[in-house]
Image: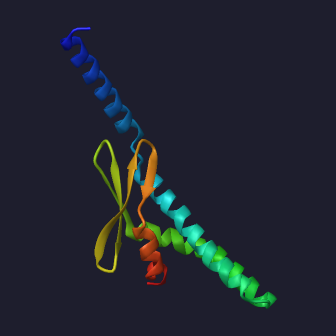
């Protein structure tokens, strides 16, 4: 294979990868869905730790009810604080909290990868403000 043909093959391969990246770049709804799942897991973990500490049935029932109602609260929080920036071949997930905006994830090839900054924000009280 001559050098010019190799260059064409490389350019076509790069073009195909870029096309796949553009077509599979996750939209804002996908970013929010991943964050919703992460926050739900965080809340369930927090609630289950609280449930194991008490033997009172009424307290356990109240915590379970709080967890159910928390789902509606999460949707409201997510719609207010989560934004995405679309860079065509990839996108970033941002949260606006405490007067500043932080990139907490990257979306590419149909996936959203979150950094540890969301965990930090949750530990600092993101859900309580």
60 left or right of 82 in image: right
Where 4 sits versus 109, above or below?
above
- Name the residue furthest top: 1
- Name the residue furthest left: 4
Q: Nearer the viewer, residue 6 or 87?
A: 6
- The location of residue 107, given as percent across then percent down, is 39, 50
Q: Nearer the viewer, residue 30 or 112?
A: 112
Where 41 sits versus 32, above or below?
below
- The location of residue 74, given as percent across then percent down, is 52, 71
Q: Nearer the viewer, residue 46 or 73?
A: 46
Question: Which residue sits at x=46%, y=59%?
Answer: 32
125 left or right of 102 in image: right
Q: How is the image coloured?
A: rainbow
Query: In the picture, which quadrant includes the C terminus?
Result: bottom left
83 left or right of 8 in image: right
Where 61 sits versus 39, above or below?
below
Question: Which residue sits at x=48%, y=71%?
Answer: 76
Question: Which residue sits at x=73%, y=83%?
Answer: 52
Question: Which residue sits at x=44%, y=78%?
Answer: 126
Quadrant in the rendering for residue 84: bottom left
- The location of residue 45, given as percent across then percent down, is 62, 74
Q: How many marks?
A: 0
Query: In the picture, which quadrant includes the N terminus?
Result: top left
């Amino acid at each position: 294979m001559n050098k010019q043909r190799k260059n064409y093959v490389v350019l076509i391969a790069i073009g195909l990868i870029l096309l796949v990246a553009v077509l599979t770049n996750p939209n804002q709804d996908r970013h929010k869905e991943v964050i919703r799942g992460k926050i739900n897991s965080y809340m369930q973990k927090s609630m289950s730790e609280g449930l194991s500490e008490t033997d009172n049935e009424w307290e356990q029932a109240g915590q379970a009810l709080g967890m159910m109602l928390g789902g509606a609260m999460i949707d409201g929080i997510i719609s207010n604080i989560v934004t995405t920036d679309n860079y065509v071949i990839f996108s970033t997930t941002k949260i606006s909290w405490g007067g500043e905006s932080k990139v907490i994830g990257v979306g590419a090839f149909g996936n959203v990868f979150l950094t540890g900054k969301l965990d930090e924000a949750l530990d600092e009280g993101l859900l309580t403000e």
